[in-house]
């Protein structure tokens, strides 16, 4: 009897637990509350569960979940972003500064994959691929005349480093005889620095297209190369630089500013104030500096621009920047997807927030830049923005600068309206211009061979009218009439064509070196730093 009394409480506990478990499993459609209700289950999860168990049709929980997340984020700022697991690797490539592949640029013309450029020293270059090669097969898959698209080709060509892929191709001048080439994939850099060269004996030019993990290291190499060539003044081009990794832009700002000057600070409701200051001797603290900006200059590039303007370190030339003053942090989720969540605002050294308003919704926010074109701001300048909060620069000049909607340049240079022509727009929209540049280059290789670099090409290539006549005839086949184009617009576009031909020969470096020779923003920058 004493033994039973000892074990009786334990038996009651076991029976109670078993009863709870059975009751929970049998609850079926019975609405429960209190003790038996699932703890802390949100209405969203309840709805998801009900759809999963009761909905008339079978639906994908993953797609429902992604739509629900997108719906939540649409109530936040425009830069908080959900990235599905399938897209994460590609999205992160730009920030990593490299990917694994074969090292070619290609475009699809008339259902044929054409090699537009081959990375010097890359896997395809080592295997013997050439500009003008046309892919017939990748591996065992036929890719010519097969309704192929860019994404499919990209997936076929990319793969782990050291793996191999065999391509079957046709080569110009080989009378239709296909050849097979096996390529060993490798790491392909995605450079942040498009070009770095000396425009004249004392002035250098560097263009940065984004801020990735490799940007500051690339910038240092470029700057030191130019310094070895006599650099005294620098034009830094941040046009169309959409930003990226904040720390990389801070490191570059540190190269331009001395002492322990404040570069930027960030603060959010759940993120304490963080100050980022200069902490080392910079590589270019004294020479004259001009920064080029436009409506595509955003985020981390605005951090750099704001610091230079607030300390009177550089002259900002061009057009008003995008106006993104929010800091995102990326969080890995359990299914391999990721969330880029805005956690703080950043402020320039004077205390300016340059974030433009987003209280009217994402659609209005997304259209704001297009409205600048529609309203003529990019052509005539932007005096209306001076109604934002005013601040005084921290350098010796003590100028007034403004917050609240991008960074207004010190010197405005308007957008070139020659590209507004309907016929010119059609060249881009229909892909006619890209096809023409590639075709003309392949058909006239011998006329480009005498030029040993972009500078020689600028000075010695005089076939502009011949190329224009060829383009006019080529465009007519796509029902694009270039004949009514005004002479001024024609001349401007001939310079663009010349730069695009240079890109075929010397890749990105060639394009910008030739384009800059005719760029009014670069011309203004050279005038400013040269005084």
Image: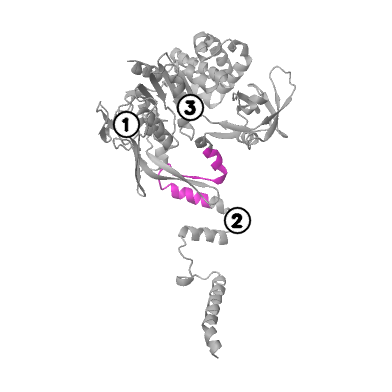
- 2 or 3: tag closer to the N-terminus: 2
Q: Position of residue 369 (x, y in %)?
A: 40, 32
SS of the residue under disc 2: loop
SS of the residue under disc 1: loop
Q: Does the stretch in magenta take in 185? A: no
Q: Residue at left 27%, top 31%?
A: 394
Instruction: Give left or right: position of 479 versus 286.
Output: right
Q: In the rendered structure, which segment of residues is drawn in magenta?
A: 65-92
Q: Position of residue 9 (x, y in %)?
A: 51, 82
Residue for badge 2:
58
Nearer to us: label 2 or label 1: 1
Residue for badge 1:
259
Nearer to us: label 2 or label 3: 3
Q: Residue at left 58%, top 54%?
A: 59
Instruction: Give left or right: position of 38 versus 142.
Output: left
* Name of the residue lying farthest toward the bottom: 1
Marks 2 and 3 sit apart, C-alpha to C-alpha, by 49 Å
Q: Please tell me how many numbered marks the rendered image carries.
A: 3
Q: Is residue 150 visible?
A: no
Residues tagged 2 and 1 counted as in contact (Cβ below 8 A)? no
Query: Picture quarter containing residue 132?
Result: top right
Residue for badge 3:
193
SS of the residue under disc 3: strand
């Amino acid at each position: 009897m004493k033994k039973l009394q000892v074990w009786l409480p334990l038996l009651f506990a076991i029976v109670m637990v078993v009863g709870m478990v059975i009751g929970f499993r049998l609850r079926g459609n019975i609405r429960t509350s209190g003790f038996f209700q699932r703890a802390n289950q949100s209405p969203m999860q309840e709805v998801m569960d009900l759809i999963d168990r009761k909905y008339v049709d079978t639906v994908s929980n993953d797609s429902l979940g992604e739509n629900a997340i997108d719906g939540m984020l649409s109530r936040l700022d425009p830069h908080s972003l959900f990235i599905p697991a399938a897209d994460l690797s590609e999205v992160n490539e730009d920030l990593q500064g490299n990917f694994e592949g074969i090292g070619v640029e290609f475009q699809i013309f008339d259902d044929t994959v054409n090699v537009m450029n081959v990375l010097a020293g890359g896997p395809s270059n080592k295997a013997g691929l050439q500009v003008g090669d046309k892919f017939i097969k990748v591996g065992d898959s036929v890719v010519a005349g097969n309704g192929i698209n860019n994404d499919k080709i990209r997936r076929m060509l990319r793969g782990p480093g050291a793996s191999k892929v065999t391509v079957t191709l046709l080569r110009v001048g080989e009378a239709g005889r296909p050849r097979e080439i096996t390529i060993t994939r490798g790491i392909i850099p995605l450079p942040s620095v498009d070009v770095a060269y000396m425009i004249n004996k004392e002035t250098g030019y560097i263009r940065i297209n984004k801020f990735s993990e490799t940007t500051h290291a690339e910038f240092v190499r470029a700057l030191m190369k130019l310094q070895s060539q006599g650099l005294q003044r620098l034009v830094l081009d941040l046009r169309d630089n959409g930003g990226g990794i904040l720390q990389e832009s801070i490191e570059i700002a540190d190269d331009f500013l001395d002492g322990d000057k404040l570069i930027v600070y960030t603060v959010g409701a759940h993120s304490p104030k963080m100050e980022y200051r200069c902490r080392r001797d910079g590589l270019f603290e004294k020479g004259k500096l001009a920064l080029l900006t436009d409506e595509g200059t955003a985020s981390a590039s605005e951090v750099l621009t704001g610091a230079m303007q607030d300390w009177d370190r550089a002259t900002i030339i061009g057009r008003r920047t995008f106006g993104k003053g929010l800091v995102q942090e990326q969080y890995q989720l359990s299914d391999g997807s990721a969330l880029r969540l805005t956690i703080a605002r950043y402020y320039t050294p004077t205390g300016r927030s340059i974030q433009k308003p987003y209280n009217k919704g994402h659609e209005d926010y997304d259209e704001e830049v297009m409205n600048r074109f529609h309203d003529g701001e990019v052509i005539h300048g932007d005096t209306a923005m001076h109604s934002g909060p005013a601040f005084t620069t921290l350098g010796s000049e003590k100028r007034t600068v403004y917050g609240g909607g991008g960074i207004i340049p010190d010197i405005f240079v308007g957008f070139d309206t020659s590209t507004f022509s309907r016929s010119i727009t059609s060249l881009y929209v229909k892909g006619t211009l890209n096809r023409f540049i590639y075709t003309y280059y392949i058909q006239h290789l011998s006329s480009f061979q005498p030029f040993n670099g972009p500078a020689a090409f600028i000075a010695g290539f005089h076939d502009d009218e011949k190329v224009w006549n060829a383009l006019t005839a080529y465009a007519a086949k796509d029902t694009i009439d270039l004949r009514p184009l005004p002479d001024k617009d024609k001349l401007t576009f001939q310079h663009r064509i010349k730069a695009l031909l240079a890109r075929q020969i010397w890749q990105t470096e060639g394009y910008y070196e030739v384009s800059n020779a005719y760029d009014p923003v670069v011309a203004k920058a050279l005038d400013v730093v040269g005084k």
